[in-house]
Amino acid sequence: MRPTLHPQHLLTAVLLMLASLGLQANALDAIVALVNDDIITRSELDSSVRETAAQLTQQGTQLPSQAILEQQVLERMITNQLQLQTATRLGITVDDATLSR
């Protein structure tokens, strides 16, 4: 005897597969910039934007639009990453005591 395929079971299976795909998509962090061999992810950018917005608000500075703020923060993150890469390539290191000064 052949088992019958119930539409409800098929629908449940499809929904479970789609839900698992959605969870996998959320688990992946989108890449917003590639700086040579390093990446900047969406979550890193979002975190930096939140920190920058909080600092500007605390200083009483009017915030630019979200798009402009994101662009400026991303440009700063790229510049910082390039500087770190250059320092590493040149063998430049700074110890904690020097940073504290």
Image (cartoon, rainbow, N blue to C red):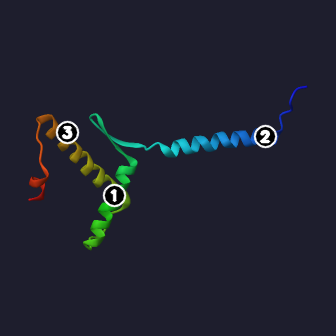
Q: Which callout, 2 or 1, points to the residue nearer the camera?
A: 2
Label 2: which secondary element:
helix
Quarter of the image for residue 6 reads top right
The relative height of residue 72 versus residue 7 in the rendered view (above or below) is below
Quarter of the image for residue 63 reads bottom left
Query: Which of the two discs, 3 and 2, labels the residue nearer the N terminus?
Result: 2
Name the amino acid type tagged 3. Gln
Q: Which mark is residue 9?
A: 2
Q: Residues within 10 Å of mark 3 (few under 14, many from 20)?
A: some
* Quarter of the image where the C terminus is located: bottom left
Residue pictured at 51% horizontal, 46% vertical: 26
Q: Pointer 1: what residue?
A: 49
State how many labels appear.
3
Label 1: which secondary element:
helix
Residue pictured at 91% horizontal, 25% vertical: 1
Query: Which of the two discs, 3 and 1, labels the residue nearer the N terminus?
Result: 1
Q: Which callout, 3 or 1, points to the residue nearer the camera?
A: 3
Q: Which mark is residue 77?
A: none
Q: Pointer 3: what residue?
A: 85
Name the amino acid type tagged 2. His
